[in-house]
Amino acid sequence: MAVVDVSEELKSLSSTLESIEAVLDLDKLRAEIAVLEEQAASPALWNDPENAQQVTSRLSVLQGQVRKTEELRSRIEDLGVLFELAESENDADTLAEARNELESVRKTVAELEVRTLLSGEYDSREAMVSIRAEAGGVDAADFAEQLQRMYLRWAERRGYPTEVLDTSYAEEAGIKSTTFSVRAPYAYGTLSVEQGTHRMVRISPFDNQGRRQTSFAGVEVLPVVEQTDHIDIPENEIRIDVFRSSGPGGQSVNTTDSAVRMTHLPTGIVVSCQNEKSQLQNRAAAMRVLQARLLAHRRAEEQAKMDALKVEGGKSWGSQMRSYVLQPYQMVKDLRTEFEVGTPQAVLDGDIDDFLEAGIRWRKQQEQEAQN
């Protein structure tokens, strides 16, 4: 590669990185990091473990984003110097090193660019992946197990923790279904493009006559719901009424206005408490009940959103989105993006980054066309 060509490519990569930096808004990220660092340094942070976990997790993600972007900027600048050095000294080893670094920078810029396309409401969440065997009998069960291995291997390569939550094994081979989590930021946004029906064509290892078999497996991807066990309720969202307790009780229970009724105005949820002797105790008890009911209400809303996503995804469960052909030729092809490779075994071993990138770009294009 000529120095002029390298110079032009480095300018292009630098320009792309500038666009990425603008989308990420690094100044805004650094300001948020400063606030989170101050919170993380507080001795009282771990008095609330749930909040502490959120603060430290968010801080780690943002620091990683900024650090990766800054390092990438430095690598692009250093590459120009490295190529010039290799040419001036006619050093083949340095030139090979520079070319390898250039390829690595290309890949990193592309990955970072794709990350900026993940701007959906749930895209930054961890992922819950379910796979089920569909038509194709034992071959479908075997295919479903291969898909599970493919995604787990992909996550392992990236250092993403996974947890298999449930697996139903088929009688002869493979699995009927499985559910596992991928616990990494943006795992949902990244893997959500995998949702749909996957199709495999091969000579069945389970057929005595060695016939070609087509089998299907469905993949569903949902965002992990973020839940907490405590809800803060602004005072202006509550109406409190006091009244005299009724029913059996001690002397002070029925003779004073100690009973409390709380109404949560935004939802209309009403709770009351009159079992304690004092109004203060009844208020505290009623607040605990209201918090519990609001938590259940919020979880129901979150579940409704997840069900809506599942319904939307269900449309693609019934439609083929990718074919894996092992015989009579070898090919893996995404039927939406038209992206294909001729190395199905590498794909089944977890090499799916190119498919994920193509899917994310395709989805973004579909969204933009729909808006227009």
Image (cartoon, rainbow, N blue to C red):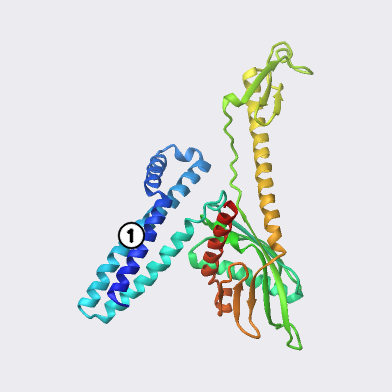
Residue drawn at the location 51% of the way across and 39% of the way down = 48
Up-down relation of residue 236 to residue 300 (above or below): above
Q: Left or right of 214: which side holds 116?
A: left
Residue drawn at the location 53% of the way across and 43% of the way down = 50
Could you say where residue 244 lies in the image, as x and y percent from the top left?
Answer: 72, 14
Could you say where residue 127 lies in the image, as x and y percent from the top left?
Answer: 58, 56
Q: Nearer the viewer, residue 36 or 266?
A: 266
Q: Secondary structure under badge 1?
A: helix
Q: Identify which amino acid the numbered label 1 is placed on.
A: Arg
The answer to whether one can see residue 92 in this image is yes
Residue drawn at the location 32% of the way across and 68% of the way down = 8
Q: Nearer the viewer, residue 197 or 240?
A: 197
Q: Residue furthest bottom?
A: 209
The answer to whether one can see residue 155 in this image is no
Q: Residue furthest left?
A: 89
Up-down relation of residue 43 to residue 210 (above or below): above
Q: Left or right of 277: which side holds 351?
A: left
Q: What residue is pinned by disc 1?
A: 73
Q: Where does the N terminus fall, quadrant-wise? A: bottom left
Q: Residue furthest right?
A: 247
